[in-house]
Image: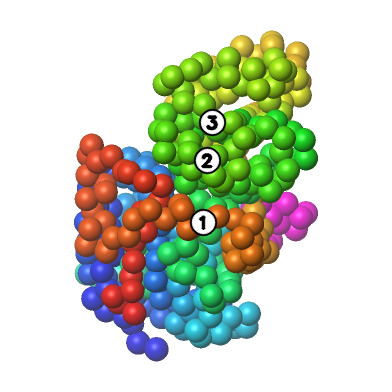
Amino acid sequence: MIALEDQPALVLHALGQTPRIERVTISPPGPGEVLVRILASGVCHTDIGSVQYARTTPVILGHEGAGIVAALGEGVAHLAIGDHVAINWQAKCGTCRNCVSGRRQFCEGILGTSEPRVHLEGKPLAVLLNAGTFCPYVVVPASGAVPIRNDMPFAVAALLGCAVATGVGAAMFSAKVQPGDDVVVIGCGGVGLNTVQGARLANARAIIAVDRDPEKLALARRLGATHAVDSTAETVLDAVMKVTSDRGVDHAFELVGRTDLMVEALGLLARGGRLTLVGAAGREDEMAFKPRGFMSKQQTICGCIYGDVQPERDLPMLADWYADGRLELDALHTSTIGINDLPALFEPGYRQTGIRTVVSFEEFA
């Protein structure tokens, strides 16, 4: 296979700059790697935040994608050309201490390609989260392409790889919500709405959705929230205590990435309650709270990345749940754009509307 030349990609050249479309070259996959023709890629808060926090530049943005296997590197046996796949941006190494002890969600050696597979003007480009899905083609480690059912629309399948896995997994796998638990979800964007769905699937008792947007709160109710709290109109603490008879919740999920909301969420917990941090705060942000009451109430704070999912098992399962109606995902896909429209979403002051914007690459198919 020869290299794919003149492919459009969204490239961030330096922190603080608006990324722009560049024409790049994609090298063939090496041993243990897969070339995927991307058909759709969701625009996630992580992509937007990378303009300020990317660990390296220049870098191709995008990590929430789905497409079709276009070529296989040597030794790849679990996939075939033409398979429909969701991109898994956490391909586990399988050899670190956590992987071999059965705690793959804490892998210490997340895989990328063996060498750079994307070049701009002859120079290698990094790809965000070992994916770089804002491009019609990506090369990923073999386990970075997870086969899913072929009757799922690509625009929805793309969301499996981040918003859906992270949100549903936060409730079901990270926090391990139990039947009858009371839950509050602070922030009802794409991940928060899926956290609501995860709590519903876990058979939580009260699922309290908190946001400032009435449309998002209405959607949260549709997806399983038993109560909706508009934080601009009522005090969240009062609302939560009313629902829980002054006990507090067993689980609080912070999805916004604001430290003041994290501290507020701590105050909503019952004895033995758990705060799960899902929203990405700034790298230099600090959270301050009073530890004595936290200790006395035997509470827990836990970070959550990717919902602690096992991607090879859980992404196909989530696709099946969508197909059988247990997961409502169509309502999350609120707009579709082409790649040339993408840089505008990264302009300073741009305010995203809806839940998830999806970039379609159908024109390059």
Callout 3: SS: strand
Give amino acid for label 1.
Answer: Leu
Please report the residue visible at 50 percent of the width from the left and 51 percent of the height from the top. Answer: 163
Badge 3 is on which residue?
A: 228
**Alpha carbon distance from label 2 to label 3:** 8 Å
**Residue 153 picture location, percent across and down:** 47, 69
Give amino acid for label 2.
Answer: Ala
* 138 versus 168 height, above or below: below
The quarter holding residue 226 reads top right
**Residue 67 picture location, percent across and down:** 45, 72
Q: In the image, which is nearer the foreground, mark 3 or mark 1?
A: 3
* 10 versus 219 height, above or below: below
Marks 2 and 1: CB-CB under 8 Å?
no
Task: Pick whichever of labels 2 and 3 is earlier in the sequence.
Answer: 2
The magenta segment: 94-107
Please report the residue visible at 54 percent of the width from the left and 77 percent of the height from the top. Answer: 150
Please report the residue visible at 54 percent of the width from the left and 20 percent of the height from the top. Answer: 236
* 37 versus 110 height, above or below: below
Q: Is residue 72 visible?
A: no
Badge 1 is on which residue?
A: 329
- Residue 275 in the magenta stretch? The answer is no
Callout 1: SS: loop
Callout 2: SS: helix
**Residue 14 picture location, percent across and down:** 26, 47
Marks 2 and 3: CB-CB under 8 Å?
yes
Crowd tier of the residue under label 3, counting other residues whose Cα lies within 10 Å: few below 14, some 14–19, many 20 or above? many
Crowd tier of the residue under label 1, counting other residues whose Cα lies within 10 Å: few below 14, some 14–19, many 20 or above? many
Badge 2 is on which residue?
A: 220
Please report the residue visible at 46 percent of the width from the left and 26 percent of the height from the top. Answer: 230
Q: Is 103 or 334 nearer to us in this picture?
A: 334
Residue at the bottom extreme, as displayed? 1
**Alpha carbon distance from label 2 to label 1:** 12 Å
